[in-house]
Image (spheres, grey):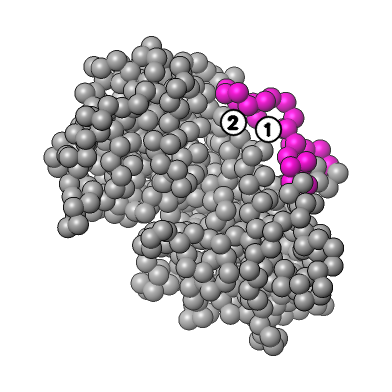
Protein backbone atom coordinates (compact mmCIF):
# COMPACT_ATOMS: atom_id res chain seq x y z
CA UNK A 1 0.00 0.00 0.00
CA UNK A 2 1.38 3.42 -0.88
CA UNK A 3 2.59 5.33 2.13
CA UNK A 4 2.71 2.25 4.33
CA UNK A 5 6.50 2.32 4.35
CA UNK A 6 6.71 3.82 7.83
CA UNK A 7 8.56 1.74 10.37
CA UNK A 8 8.94 4.10 13.28
CA UNK A 9 9.13 7.70 14.36
CA UNK A 10 11.71 10.25 15.39
CA UNK A 11 11.80 11.53 18.93
CA UNK A 12 9.77 14.56 17.89
CA UNK A 13 7.05 12.43 16.37
CA UNK A 14 7.97 12.80 12.71
CA UNK A 15 7.25 9.48 10.95
CA UNK A 16 10.22 7.55 9.67
CA UNK A 17 9.98 5.60 6.45
CA UNK A 18 12.69 3.13 5.48
CA UNK A 19 14.94 3.13 8.46
CA UNK A 20 15.52 6.44 10.13
CA UNK A 21 16.55 9.91 9.17
CA UNK A 22 20.02 10.82 10.35
CA UNK A 23 19.79 14.17 12.08
CA UNK A 24 17.27 16.08 10.06
CA UNK A 25 17.81 19.38 8.40
CA UNK A 26 18.01 21.57 11.48
CA UNK A 27 21.26 23.45 11.76
CA UNK A 28 22.48 22.33 8.37
CA UNK A 29 23.22 24.66 5.51
CA UNK A 30 21.73 21.97 3.33
CA UNK A 31 20.92 21.69 -0.32
CA UNK A 32 22.22 24.13 -2.90
CA UNK A 33 19.85 24.32 -5.79
CA UNK A 34 20.61 25.57 -9.25
CA UNK A 35 21.09 28.98 -7.73
CA UNK A 36 23.66 29.68 -5.09
CA UNK A 37 25.82 31.89 -2.99
CA UNK A 38 28.69 34.34 -2.95
CA UNK A 39 31.65 33.81 -0.67
CA UNK A 40 34.28 36.24 0.48
CA UNK A 41 37.33 35.62 2.60
CA UNK A 42 39.04 38.60 4.21
CA UNK A 43 42.52 38.32 5.55
CA UNK A 44 43.32 41.84 6.58
CA UNK A 45 44.63 43.99 3.77
CA UNK A 46 43.40 45.01 0.41
CA UNK A 47 44.00 43.07 -2.79
CA UNK A 48 41.08 41.52 -4.68
CA UNK A 49 41.15 38.54 -7.04
CA UNK A 50 38.14 36.64 -8.40
CA UNK A 51 37.37 32.96 -8.38
CA UNK A 52 34.30 30.64 -8.31
CA UNK A 53 32.74 28.02 -6.07
CA UNK A 54 29.63 26.06 -5.12
CA UNK A 55 28.54 26.18 -1.46
CA UNK A 56 28.40 28.33 1.63
CA UNK A 57 30.24 29.00 4.83
CA UNK A 58 30.72 31.13 7.96
CA UNK A 59 28.34 30.27 10.81
CA UNK A 60 29.74 29.09 14.12
CA UNK A 61 32.45 26.52 13.43
CA UNK A 62 34.74 24.05 15.04
CA UNK A 63 34.90 25.68 18.47
CA UNK A 64 36.76 22.71 19.88
CA UNK A 65 39.85 23.67 17.92
CA UNK A 66 39.71 27.07 19.58
CA UNK A 67 39.30 25.63 23.06
CA UNK A 68 35.54 26.11 23.18
CA UNK A 69 32.75 23.52 23.64
CA UNK A 70 32.01 21.36 20.65
CA UNK A 71 28.36 21.45 19.46
CA UNK A 72 26.20 18.41 20.05
CA UNK A 73 25.40 16.35 16.99
CA UNK A 74 21.71 15.56 16.74
CA UNK A 75 20.89 11.92 17.45
CA UNK A 76 19.99 9.70 14.54
CA UNK A 77 17.75 6.71 14.10
CA UNK A 78 20.51 4.72 12.46
CA UNK A 79 23.67 3.42 14.08
CA UNK A 80 25.30 6.84 14.55
CA UNK A 81 26.60 7.48 18.09
CA UNK A 82 24.60 9.79 20.32
CA UNK A 83 25.78 12.46 22.70
CA UNK A 84 28.48 15.04 22.11
CA UNK A 85 30.55 14.29 19.04
CA UNK A 86 33.71 16.31 18.48
CA UNK A 87 35.29 16.53 15.06
CA UNK A 88 38.33 18.34 16.43
CA UNK A 89 40.72 15.35 16.70
CA UNK A 90 40.22 14.30 13.08
CA UNK A 91 40.63 17.83 11.77
CA UNK A 92 43.70 18.40 13.90
CA UNK A 93 45.18 15.20 12.54
CA UNK A 94 44.54 16.27 8.99
CA UNK A 95 46.28 19.59 9.56
CA UNK A 96 49.19 18.42 11.67
CA UNK A 97 50.34 15.53 9.54
CA UNK A 98 52.36 16.06 6.41
CA UNK A 99 50.48 15.82 3.14
CA UNK A 100 51.76 15.26 -0.37
CA UNK A 101 52.32 18.44 -2.33
CA UNK A 102 50.29 19.21 -5.41
CA UNK A 103 51.57 21.06 -8.44
CA UNK A 104 51.37 24.68 -7.29
CA UNK A 105 50.25 27.38 -9.64
CA UNK A 106 50.77 31.04 -8.83
CA UNK A 107 47.58 33.07 -9.07
CA UNK A 108 48.60 36.41 -7.57
CA UNK A 109 49.32 39.37 -9.81
CA UNK A 110 52.99 40.42 -9.90
CA UNK A 111 52.13 44.13 -9.63
CA UNK A 112 49.64 45.82 -7.28
CA UNK A 113 46.12 45.70 -8.72
CA UNK A 114 44.06 48.87 -9.12
CA UNK A 115 42.06 50.19 -6.20
CA UNK A 116 38.46 49.05 -5.84
CA UNK A 117 35.55 50.12 -3.65
CA UNK A 118 33.93 46.70 -3.95
CA UNK A 119 32.06 47.23 -7.21
CA UNK A 120 32.44 44.49 -9.81
CA UNK A 121 32.49 45.15 -13.55
CA UNK A 122 30.58 42.33 -15.31
CA UNK A 123 32.77 42.85 -18.38
CA UNK A 124 35.75 41.58 -16.37
CA UNK A 125 34.16 38.23 -15.57
CA UNK A 126 35.89 35.17 -17.01
CA UNK A 127 35.77 31.41 -16.65
CA UNK A 128 38.04 30.28 -13.88
CA UNK A 129 41.69 29.78 -14.83
CA UNK A 130 42.85 29.04 -11.29
CA UNK A 131 44.43 25.69 -10.39
CA UNK A 132 41.30 24.54 -8.55
CA UNK A 133 38.39 25.58 -10.75
CA UNK A 134 39.94 25.54 -14.21
CA UNK A 135 37.73 23.60 -16.60
CA UNK A 136 34.70 23.64 -14.29
CA UNK A 137 31.67 25.89 -14.58
CA UNK A 138 32.95 28.67 -12.34
CA UNK A 139 33.96 32.30 -12.73
CA UNK A 140 36.50 34.75 -11.37
CA UNK A 141 37.74 38.34 -11.71
CA UNK A 142 41.04 40.13 -12.15
CA UNK A 143 42.81 41.28 -8.95
CA UNK A 144 41.88 44.61 -7.41
CA UNK A 145 42.58 46.50 -4.19
CA UNK A 146 40.05 47.24 -1.47
CA UNK A 147 40.32 50.92 -0.60
CA UNK A 148 40.90 51.79 3.04
CA UNK A 149 41.85 48.27 4.10
CA UNK A 150 45.21 49.21 5.57
CA UNK A 151 43.81 52.11 7.58
CA UNK A 152 40.66 50.44 8.89
CA UNK A 153 40.03 46.70 9.42
CA UNK A 154 36.29 47.43 9.48
CA UNK A 155 36.53 49.21 6.14
CA UNK A 156 38.39 46.21 4.74
CA UNK A 157 35.71 43.87 6.06
CA UNK A 158 32.96 45.99 4.54
CA UNK A 159 34.78 46.07 1.20
CA UNK A 160 35.04 42.30 1.34
CA UNK A 161 31.29 42.01 1.91
CA UNK A 162 30.51 44.36 -0.96
CA UNK A 163 32.84 42.52 -3.33
CA UNK A 164 31.09 39.23 -2.56
CA UNK A 165 27.64 40.75 -3.10
CA UNK A 166 28.78 42.57 -6.26
CA UNK A 167 30.22 39.37 -7.68
CA UNK A 168 26.84 37.69 -7.25
CA UNK A 169 25.15 40.62 -9.00
CA UNK A 170 27.66 40.50 -11.86
CA UNK A 171 27.06 36.78 -12.41
CA UNK A 172 23.29 37.29 -12.37
CA UNK A 173 23.62 40.13 -14.89
CA UNK A 174 25.66 37.85 -17.15
CA UNK A 175 22.92 35.21 -16.87
CA UNK A 176 20.23 37.77 -17.68
CA UNK A 177 22.09 38.92 -20.81
CA UNK A 178 22.85 35.36 -21.93
CA UNK A 179 26.62 35.60 -21.40
CA UNK A 180 26.33 32.74 -18.91
CA UNK A 181 23.81 29.96 -19.47
CA UNK A 182 21.18 29.73 -16.75
CA UNK A 183 21.87 26.02 -16.44
CA UNK A 184 25.55 26.78 -15.72
CA UNK A 185 24.92 29.56 -13.20
CA UNK A 186 26.85 28.93 -9.97
CA UNK A 187 25.08 28.92 -6.64
CA UNK A 188 27.22 31.49 -4.91
CA UNK A 189 30.06 33.96 -5.22
CA UNK A 190 32.73 34.61 -2.63
CA UNK A 191 35.86 36.55 -1.74
CA UNK A 192 38.91 35.76 0.41
CA UNK A 193 41.12 38.44 1.96
CA UNK A 194 44.52 37.38 3.23
CA UNK A 195 46.26 39.17 6.13
CA UNK A 196 48.42 41.01 3.60
CA UNK A 197 45.32 42.59 2.06
CA UNK A 198 44.91 40.36 -0.98
CA UNK A 199 41.29 39.58 -1.81
CA UNK A 200 40.38 36.78 -4.21
CA UNK A 201 36.86 36.44 -5.61
CA UNK A 202 35.43 33.21 -6.97
CA UNK A 203 32.08 31.53 -7.49
CA UNK A 204 31.15 28.03 -6.48
CA UNK A 205 32.09 25.25 -8.88
CA UNK A 206 30.14 22.63 -10.80
CA UNK A 207 31.70 19.88 -12.88
CA UNK A 208 31.79 20.19 -16.66
CA UNK A 209 29.98 17.01 -17.70
CA UNK A 210 30.48 17.68 -21.40
CA UNK A 211 34.00 16.25 -21.11
CA UNK A 212 34.94 12.57 -20.74
CA UNK A 213 35.48 12.09 -17.89
CA UNK A 214 33.71 15.07 -16.37
CA UNK A 215 36.05 17.89 -15.33
CA UNK A 216 35.95 18.12 -11.54
CA UNK A 217 37.58 20.73 -9.27
CA UNK A 218 41.28 20.05 -8.59
CA UNK A 219 41.31 20.66 -4.86
CA UNK A 220 44.72 21.07 -3.22
CA UNK A 221 45.78 17.85 -1.39
CA UNK A 222 45.93 19.59 2.00
CA UNK A 223 42.35 20.82 1.70
CA UNK A 224 41.21 17.54 0.15
CA UNK A 225 42.47 15.71 3.25
CA UNK A 226 40.53 18.12 5.47
CA UNK A 227 37.38 17.58 3.42
CA UNK A 228 37.79 13.81 3.63
CA UNK A 229 38.31 13.95 7.41
CA UNK A 230 35.26 16.18 7.75
CA UNK A 231 33.13 13.76 5.72
CA UNK A 232 34.17 10.87 7.97
CA UNK A 233 33.12 12.71 11.12
CA UNK A 234 29.81 14.27 10.08
CA UNK A 235 26.51 12.38 9.71
CA UNK A 236 25.93 14.38 6.53
CA UNK A 237 28.31 16.65 4.67
CA UNK A 238 27.39 20.04 3.29
CA UNK A 239 25.43 20.13 0.07
CA UNK A 240 28.29 21.60 -1.95
CA UNK A 241 30.97 19.50 -0.26
CA UNK A 242 34.23 20.04 -2.17
CA UNK A 243 32.71 22.53 -4.63
CA UNK A 244 31.84 25.53 -2.48
CA UNK A 245 33.21 28.99 -3.05
CA UNK A 246 35.24 28.52 0.09
CA UNK A 247 36.89 25.48 -1.42
CA UNK A 248 37.89 27.28 -4.60
CA UNK A 249 39.19 30.31 -2.73
CA UNK A 250 41.14 28.45 -0.08
CA UNK A 251 42.47 25.76 -2.43
CA UNK A 252 43.83 28.36 -4.87
CA UNK A 253 45.56 30.11 -1.98
CA UNK A 254 47.05 26.80 -0.83
CA UNK A 255 48.57 26.22 -4.26
CA UNK A 256 50.09 29.69 -4.08
CA UNK A 257 51.29 29.24 -0.49
CA UNK A 258 52.85 25.91 -1.36
CA UNK A 259 54.94 27.60 -4.04
CA UNK A 260 56.02 30.26 -1.53
CA UNK A 261 56.89 27.52 0.97
CA UNK A 262 59.06 25.80 -1.63
CA UNK A 263 60.76 29.05 -2.60
CA UNK A 264 61.57 29.73 1.06
CA UNK A 265 63.26 26.33 1.44
CA UNK A 266 60.30 24.41 2.90
CA UNK A 267 60.46 25.72 6.47
CA UNK A 268 58.61 23.28 8.75
CA UNK A 269 55.59 21.47 7.37
CA UNK A 270 53.37 22.86 4.65
CA UNK A 271 50.26 22.62 6.83
CA UNK A 272 51.85 24.66 9.64
CA UNK A 273 53.17 27.16 7.12
CA UNK A 274 49.74 27.53 5.50
CA UNK A 275 47.94 27.96 8.82
CA UNK A 276 50.37 30.69 9.83
CA UNK A 277 49.63 32.53 6.58
CA UNK A 278 45.87 32.07 6.93
CA UNK A 279 45.83 33.35 10.53
CA UNK A 280 43.63 36.44 10.50
CA UNK A 281 41.92 35.77 7.19
CA UNK A 282 38.19 36.38 6.77
CA UNK A 283 35.56 35.04 4.41
CA UNK A 284 31.88 35.66 3.53
CA UNK A 285 29.33 34.36 0.99
CA UNK A 286 26.09 35.56 -0.60
CA UNK A 287 23.21 33.94 -2.44
CA UNK A 288 23.19 33.98 -6.23
CA UNK A 289 19.63 33.86 -7.52
CA UNK A 290 16.92 32.34 -5.34
CA UNK A 291 17.08 29.17 -3.27
CA UNK A 292 15.14 27.27 -0.65
CA UNK A 293 17.36 25.40 1.77
CA UNK A 294 16.71 23.75 5.13
CA UNK A 295 13.39 25.51 5.50
CA UNK A 296 14.85 28.93 4.68
CA UNK A 297 13.97 30.96 1.61
CA UNK A 298 17.03 32.79 0.28
CA UNK A 299 16.76 35.68 -2.15
CA UNK A 300 19.46 36.91 -4.49
CA UNK A 301 22.17 38.76 -2.56
CA UNK A 302 21.28 37.31 0.85
CA UNK A 303 24.08 36.39 3.20
CA UNK A 304 24.55 32.61 3.36
CA UNK A 305 26.11 30.98 6.42
CA UNK A 306 28.65 28.17 5.97
CA UNK A 307 27.49 24.67 5.09
CA UNK A 308 28.08 21.93 7.64
CA UNK A 309 31.37 20.97 5.94
CA UNK A 310 32.74 24.50 5.60
CA UNK A 311 31.84 25.40 9.17
CA UNK A 312 34.30 22.72 10.27
CA UNK A 313 37.39 23.10 8.11
CA UNK A 314 37.36 26.88 7.44
CA UNK A 315 38.02 27.93 11.06
CA UNK A 316 40.34 24.95 11.49
CA UNK A 317 42.63 26.70 9.03
CA UNK A 318 42.50 29.95 11.01
CA UNK A 319 40.08 31.69 8.65
CA UNK A 320 37.26 33.68 10.23
CA UNK A 321 33.86 33.54 8.54
CA UNK A 322 32.14 36.91 8.83
CA UNK A 323 28.45 37.83 8.61
CA UNK A 324 26.83 40.45 6.43
CA UNK A 325 24.46 41.89 9.06
CA UNK A 326 22.56 43.99 6.53
CA UNK A 327 21.62 40.98 4.39
CA UNK A 328 20.78 38.26 6.90
CA UNK A 329 17.59 36.40 5.93
CA UNK A 330 14.47 37.87 7.51
CA UNK A 331 12.91 35.66 10.24
CA UNK A 332 9.64 35.38 8.33
CA UNK A 333 11.50 33.54 5.54
CA UNK A 334 12.77 30.86 7.93
CA UNK A 335 10.37 27.92 8.04
CA UNK A 336 10.28 24.93 10.36
CA UNK A 337 13.37 22.91 9.37
CA UNK A 338 11.95 19.63 10.63
CA UNK A 339 13.53 16.61 8.96
CA UNK A 340 11.75 14.56 6.31
CA UNK A 341 10.57 11.10 7.29
CA UNK A 342 12.60 8.16 6.06
CA UNK A 343 11.27 6.73 2.82
CA UNK A 344 11.87 4.06 1.18
CA UNK A 345 25.05 11.36 -9.65
CA UNK A 346 23.98 12.01 -9.71
CA UNK A 347 25.73 9.76 -7.33
CA UNK A 348 28.93 11.56 -6.27
CA UNK A 349 30.99 9.37 -8.62
CA UNK A 350 29.06 6.31 -7.38
CA UNK A 351 26.53 4.43 -9.46
CA UNK A 352 23.08 3.81 -8.05
CA UNK A 353 23.76 0.08 -8.01
CA UNK A 354 26.91 0.66 -5.93
CA UNK A 355 24.91 2.64 -3.38
CA UNK A 356 22.37 -0.12 -2.75
CA UNK A 357 22.55 -2.15 0.48
CA UNK A 358 22.59 -5.63 -1.00
CA UNK A 359 23.28 -8.66 1.25
CA UNK A 360 21.54 -6.89 4.11
CA UNK A 361 18.37 -8.35 5.67
CA UNK A 362 17.02 -4.79 5.98
CA UNK A 363 18.34 -3.78 2.57
CA UNK A 364 17.53 -4.61 -1.04
CA UNK A 365 17.60 -7.55 -3.44
CA UNK A 366 19.43 -7.49 -6.76
CA UNK A 367 16.90 -6.91 -9.58
CA UNK A 368 16.57 -9.57 -12.25
CA UNK A 369 18.47 -9.05 -15.49
CA UNK A 370 15.24 -9.57 -17.41
CA UNK A 371 13.61 -6.62 -15.65
CA UNK A 372 16.69 -4.48 -16.22
CA UNK A 373 16.78 -5.36 -19.91
CA UNK A 374 13.08 -4.61 -20.30
CA UNK A 375 13.61 -1.10 -18.96
CA UNK A 376 16.67 -0.49 -21.13
CA UNK A 377 14.75 -1.60 -24.20
CA UNK A 378 11.86 0.73 -23.38
CA UNK A 379 13.91 3.90 -22.83
CA UNK A 380 14.11 6.04 -26.02
CA UNK A 381 17.52 6.17 -27.74
CA UNK A 382 19.39 9.15 -29.16
CA UNK A 383 21.14 9.38 -32.55
CA UNK A 384 24.07 7.35 -31.19
CA UNK A 385 21.73 4.61 -29.92
CA UNK A 386 22.43 5.66 -26.32
CA UNK A 387 19.69 6.09 -23.70
CA UNK A 388 18.04 9.46 -24.18
CA UNK A 389 18.60 12.03 -21.45
CA UNK A 390 15.37 13.57 -20.09
CA UNK A 391 12.98 11.18 -21.87
CA UNK A 392 9.32 12.16 -21.70
CA UNK A 393 7.67 10.01 -18.97
CA UNK A 394 4.38 10.28 -20.87
CA UNK A 395 5.80 8.62 -23.98
CA UNK A 396 6.23 4.87 -24.18
CA UNK A 397 6.30 2.44 -21.26
CA UNK A 398 9.65 3.17 -19.64
CA UNK A 399 8.25 5.08 -16.64
CA UNK A 400 5.97 2.11 -15.91
CA UNK A 401 8.86 -0.37 -15.96
CA UNK A 402 11.11 1.35 -13.40
CA UNK A 403 9.48 -0.73 -10.64
CA UNK A 404 9.15 -3.90 -12.69
CA UNK A 405 5.65 -5.26 -12.13
CA UNK A 406 4.67 -2.60 -9.64
CA UNK A 407 3.46 -2.76 -6.04
CA UNK A 408 1.58 -6.03 -6.51
CA UNK A 409 4.89 -7.91 -6.34
CA UNK A 410 6.54 -8.72 -2.97
CA UNK A 411 9.08 -6.10 -1.91
CA UNK A 412 7.86 -3.60 -4.50
CA UNK A 413 5.18 -1.90 -2.43
CA UNK A 414 7.64 -0.62 0.20
CA UNK A 415 10.70 0.17 -1.97
CA UNK A 416 9.71 3.72 -2.91
CA UNK A 417 13.05 5.19 -1.78
CA UNK A 418 14.99 3.18 -4.36
CA UNK A 419 12.26 3.64 -6.98
CA UNK A 420 12.64 7.41 -6.71
CA UNK A 421 16.41 7.15 -7.23
CA UNK A 422 16.00 4.64 -10.06
CA UNK A 423 13.66 7.02 -11.86
CA UNK A 424 16.21 9.83 -11.53
CA UNK A 425 19.03 7.62 -12.79
CA UNK A 426 16.92 6.73 -15.82
CA UNK A 427 15.91 10.36 -16.38
CA UNK A 428 19.57 11.37 -16.58
CA UNK A 429 20.53 8.68 -19.09
CA UNK A 430 21.44 5.64 -16.97
CA UNK A 431 18.41 3.32 -16.92
CA UNK A 432 18.20 1.36 -13.67
CA UNK A 433 15.28 -0.81 -12.65
CA UNK A 434 14.40 -0.44 -8.97
CA UNK A 435 15.42 -3.07 -6.44
CA UNK A 436 12.85 -4.74 -4.21
CA UNK A 437 13.23 -4.84 -0.45
CA UNK A 438 14.92 -7.87 1.08
CA UNK A 439 12.16 -8.10 3.66
CA UNK A 440 8.76 -7.59 1.98
CA UNK A 441 7.23 -6.70 5.35
CA UNK A 442 9.40 -3.66 6.03
CA UNK A 443 11.16 -0.88 4.16
CA UNK A 444 14.86 -0.31 3.47
CA UNK A 445 16.69 0.82 6.60
CA UNK A 446 18.45 4.17 6.33
CA UNK A 447 16.91 4.96 2.97
CA UNK A 448 16.69 8.74 3.33
CA UNK A 449 20.32 8.96 4.39
CA UNK A 450 21.29 6.93 1.30
CA UNK A 451 19.20 9.18 -0.94
CA UNK A 452 20.97 12.27 0.37
CA UNK A 453 24.40 10.67 0.20
CA UNK A 454 23.94 9.52 -3.39
CA UNK A 455 22.55 12.84 -4.57
CA UNK A 456 25.19 14.79 -2.65
CA UNK A 457 22.81 17.13 -0.86
CA UNK A 458 20.08 17.31 1.76
CA UNK A 459 16.31 17.47 1.66
CA UNK A 460 14.63 20.88 1.98
CA UNK A 461 11.37 21.30 3.86
CA UNK A 462 8.65 23.11 1.91
CA UNK A 463 5.96 23.08 4.57
CA UNK A 464 2.74 21.12 4.27
CA UNK A 465 -0.03 20.30 1.83
CA UNK A 466 -0.71 21.46 -1.70
CA UNK A 467 1.05 24.80 -1.25
CA UNK A 468 4.30 22.95 -0.57
CA UNK A 469 3.89 20.92 -3.76
CA UNK A 470 3.24 24.15 -5.67
CA UNK A 471 6.55 25.44 -4.31
CA UNK A 472 8.32 22.41 -5.78
CA UNK A 473 6.73 23.09 -9.16
CA UNK A 474 7.93 26.69 -8.99
CA UNK A 475 11.44 25.53 -8.16
CA UNK A 476 11.45 23.23 -11.17
CA UNK A 477 10.31 26.05 -13.44
CA UNK A 478 13.13 28.22 -12.10
CA UNK A 479 15.63 25.40 -12.63
CA UNK A 480 14.53 25.02 -16.24
CA UNK A 481 13.92 22.10 -18.63
CA UNK A 482 15.68 18.90 -17.65
CA UNK A 483 15.54 19.60 -13.92
CA UNK A 484 14.05 17.07 -11.53
CA UNK A 485 12.85 16.59 -7.98
CA UNK A 486 13.03 13.73 -5.51
CA UNK A 487 10.02 14.25 -3.26
CA UNK A 488 9.12 12.89 0.16
CA UNK A 489 5.59 13.38 1.46
CA UNK A 490 4.25 12.27 4.80
CA UNK A 491 0.60 11.34 5.11
CA UNK A 492 -1.89 12.86 7.53
CA UNK A 493 -2.84 10.99 10.68
CA UNK A 494 -6.35 10.54 9.29
CA UNK A 495 -4.83 8.69 6.33
CA UNK A 496 -2.88 6.39 8.61
CA UNK A 497 0.46 8.20 8.68
CA UNK A 498 3.57 6.95 6.92
CA UNK A 499 5.59 8.52 4.13
CA UNK A 500 6.37 8.07 0.47
CA UNK A 501 9.02 8.96 -2.14
CA UNK A 502 8.07 10.04 -5.66
CA UNK A 503 9.29 12.43 -8.37
CA UNK A 504 8.59 15.43 -10.57
CA UNK A 505 10.48 16.69 -13.64
CA UNK A 506 10.52 19.69 -15.96
CA UNK A 507 10.17 18.31 -19.48
CA UNK A 508 10.51 21.14 -22.01
CA UNK A 509 8.74 23.51 -19.63
CA UNK A 510 5.95 21.15 -18.55
CA UNK A 511 5.99 19.92 -14.94
CA UNK A 512 5.30 16.18 -14.93
CA UNK A 513 4.62 14.30 -11.69
CA UNK A 514 5.68 10.66 -11.53
CA UNK A 515 5.06 7.94 -8.96
CA UNK A 516 7.07 5.15 -10.54
CA UNK A 517 6.31 2.75 -7.68
CA UNK A 518 2.63 2.74 -8.60
CA UNK A 519 3.22 3.42 -12.34
CA UNK A 520 1.39 6.75 -12.28
CA UNK A 521 2.23 9.81 -14.43
CA UNK A 522 0.45 13.20 -14.45
CA UNK A 523 1.05 16.45 -16.32
CA UNK A 524 -2.07 18.14 -14.93
CA UNK A 525 -1.00 18.43 -11.30
CA UNK A 526 0.54 16.52 -8.37
CA UNK A 527 -0.51 12.88 -8.06
CA UNK A 528 -0.81 13.01 -4.27
CA UNK A 529 -2.60 16.02 -2.72
CA UNK A 530 -5.59 15.19 -0.52
CA UNK A 531 -3.82 13.38 2.32
CA UNK A 532 -0.41 15.07 2.12
CA UNK A 533 1.05 16.46 5.33
CA UNK A 534 4.78 17.36 5.31
CA UNK A 535 6.65 17.88 2.03
CA UNK A 536 10.41 17.73 1.39
CA UNK A 537 12.43 17.66 -1.80
CA UNK A 538 15.84 17.61 -3.44
CA UNK A 539 15.95 19.65 -6.67
CA UNK A 540 18.52 18.79 -9.35
CA UNK A 541 19.40 20.79 -12.46
CA UNK A 542 19.45 19.48 -16.02
CA UNK A 543 22.87 17.94 -15.40
CA UNK A 544 21.80 16.18 -12.20
CA UNK A 545 23.61 18.63 -9.91
CA UNK A 546 21.90 20.03 -6.77
Q: Is residue 9 visible?
A: yes
Left or right of residue 390, residue 244 in this image: right
* Residue at (19% x, 34% y) in the render: 374
Residue range in magenta is 68-92
Quadrant where the N terminus lies?
A: top left
Viewer-side residue, 393 vs 430: 430
Viewer-side residue, 283 vs 410: 410
* Secondary structure under the numbered disc 1 in the rendered image: loop
Viewer-side residue, 438 vs 339: 438
Q: Which residue is tagged 2?
A: 23
* Residue at (29% x, 48% y) in the render: 429
Residue at the farthest left position: 396
Q: Residues within 10 Å of mark 1 (few under 14, many from 20)?
A: some
Looking at the picture, how far across and down is residue 192, in whole percent? Answer: 67, 67
Q: Which residue is tagged 1?
A: 73
Quadrant of the rendered image containing residue 6: top left
Viewer-side residue, 452 vs 521: 452
Q: Is residue 531 visible?
A: no
Compared to residue 398, the image places residue 238 above or below, namely: below
Residue 41 colored in magenta in the image? no
Looking at the picture, how far across and down is residue 318, in whole percent? Answer: 78, 57
Compared to residue 25, the image places residue 163 above or below, namely: below
Quadrant of the rendered image containing residue 214: bottom left
Residue at the farthest top position: 441
Looking at the picture, how far across and down is residue 197, in whole percent? Answer: 75, 75
Compared to residue 381, the image places residue 301 above or below, namely: below
Looking at the picture, how far across and down is residue 288, in whole percent? Answer: 50, 60
Q: Are marks 2 and 1 in contact (CB under 8 Å)?
A: yes
Task: Give the mark, 2 or 1, whose residue is nearer the N terminus.
Answer: 2
Cα distance between the residues tagged 2 and 1 = 8 Å
Q: Residues within 10 Å of mark 2 (few under 14, many from 20)?
A: many
* Residue at (38% x, 63% y) in the render: 211
Amino acid sequence: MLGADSVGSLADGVPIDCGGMADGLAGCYGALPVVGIAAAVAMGGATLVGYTLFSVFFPQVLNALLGMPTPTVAPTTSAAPTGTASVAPAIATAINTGLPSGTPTATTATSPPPASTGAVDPARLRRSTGPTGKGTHSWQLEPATAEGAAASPRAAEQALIEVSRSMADAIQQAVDTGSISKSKRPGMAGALMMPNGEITVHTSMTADKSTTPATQPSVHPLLRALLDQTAQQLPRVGAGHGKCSEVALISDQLYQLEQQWINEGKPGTLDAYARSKFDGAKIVTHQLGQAFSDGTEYHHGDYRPPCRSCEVYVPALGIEPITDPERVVAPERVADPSPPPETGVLGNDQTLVESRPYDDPQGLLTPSQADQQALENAVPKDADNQPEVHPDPRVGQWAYLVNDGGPTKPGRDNNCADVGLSFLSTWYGDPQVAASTADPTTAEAGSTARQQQWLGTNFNSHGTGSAALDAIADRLRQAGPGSSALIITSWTAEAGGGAHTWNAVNHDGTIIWVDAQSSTVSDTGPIHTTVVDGVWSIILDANGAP
